Every structure is written in structure tokens, then in C-alpha cells.
Image (spheres, rainbow, N blue to C red):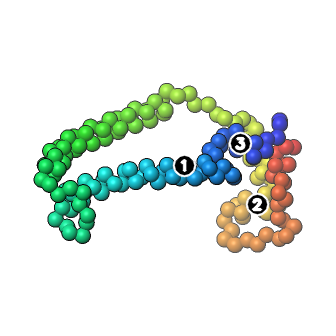
Amino acid sequence: MEKTEKKDVMQQYVTDKYFTKGHWWTKIWQTLVAIIGWICVAIPVYWTISSTLLANNPRFIHAWKYEEGKTLFYFFDRFFIFAFILIAIIVIISTIHNNHRVKQHISKERQYDEEQLAIRKRRLNNFYTTRFGQETFRQHVKHYTVDPEQNLDVHEIHKLYED
């Protein structure tokens, strides 16, 4: 079996330049786009709330003060409530349907060799028994001090599996 390094696996699956070292322009650009996007969400929300629900509160700056804007907002509130309820129902039904598909129809197969796993568990248990004592003792002890010679080497478990 070929030995795989962790960095090779990470390079194979993680490709986001934002979180890797370097790539400063990508980080600056994506951060600016995210901030601008949130501003584009926050301003209309503040504009709408300050001019309708908080219209009588003098501490807020109101985007509009004329009656037509309020009338239009309250006219659309029924539409937005209906749209929200409809979208929520669609999302819930889609989620339930997708969960059903995943649980019932997608094939499930083991990604590991069960016999090899059982062998490794036995080897590890025997190793721990030799090094630290019986399994019942290890599970029920409340305090245990490891002697320096009992410390594990960095690759000791990996070497145990290779045998």
C-alpha cells in the first residue's frame, strides 16, 4: 500500500485560494466583494424599516417621508408574506425529499476493509494492554500518570498498522 502524505490529500481536496498562504489579492478582492454585498443587503433593509416601522421615531434617518412609499410598502406586505410562506413550504418539501433520496436511493458502500479494521483494532487493543494495562482498568480509572517510557512515538501506531 502506498503511503499518502497529509499535504497531498489536502491539496487534492482543498482548493480555496482564500484560505491558503499567499494569494493576497484574492483575499482583498473577495473581502471587498463580501463587504459590498452585505452593504447592498443592509441599506435597503434599513431604508424600508426606518421609513415604515420606525417612521415615528425621530432618532432614525428616514429614507422617505411621503405617504405613497408607506402605502406601497404596506400594499406589498401581503405579497411578501405569501411569497415567504410559499418559499418556506417549497424549501421544507425539497429538504424532506432530498433527505429521503439520500437515505433510501443512494448506494451505501463501505469505504474501508472491515476485516482489516478488525485486525487493526485487535492489534491496537493488544498494544494498549501491553503498554497501559487491561482494558477494564483503562476504562474505569479516574486518574493515571503516564511514565516517560510509556509515551508514544510519533509514528508508533502507524508502524503497528504496517506490520
Question: Residue 6: x percent and y percent?
Answer: 75, 46
Q: Are marks 2 and 3 in contact (CB under 8 Å)?
A: no
Question: Residue drawn 23% across and 60% down?
Answer: 62
- For badge 3, the amino acid type reads Gln
Work out which quarter of the rendered image holds the N terminus and state it: top right
- For badge 2, the amino acid type reads Gln
Question: Residue drawn 20% across and 56% down?
Answer: 64
Element type where label 3 sits in the image? helix
Q: Nearer the viewer, residue 137 or 53?
A: 53
- For badge 1, the amino acid type reads Gln
Q: Nearer the viewer, residue 114 or 1?
A: 1
Dot 2 or dot 3: first in sequence order is 3
User: In which image quadrant can residue 162 be found?
Assistant: top right
Question: Residue drawn 18% across and 61% down?
Answer: 55
Which residue is labeled 3 in the image? 11
Dot 3 or dot 1: first in sequence order is 3
Neighbor class of circle 2 (other Cα within 10 Å; few <14, some 14-19, many 20+) is few
Classify residue 31 as left or right of residue 48. right
As measured in the structure, the alpha-carbon distance from the residue carrying label 2 to the one carrying label 3 is 41 Å
For residue 30, the mark is 1
Which residue is labeled 2 in the image? 134
Work out which quarter of the rendered image holds the C terminus and state it: top right
User: In which image quadrant can residue 142 be found?
Assistant: bottom right
Closer mark to the observer between disc 3 and disc 1:
1
Q: How many marks?
A: 3
Closer mark to the observer between disc 2 and disc 3:
3
Classify residue 24 as left or right of residue 30. right
- Residue 18 showing in the rendered view: no
Q: Nearer the viewer, residue 113 or 101?
A: 101
Question: Residue 152: x percent and y percent?
Answer: 82, 60
Vertical side of 152 occupied by 34: above or below: above
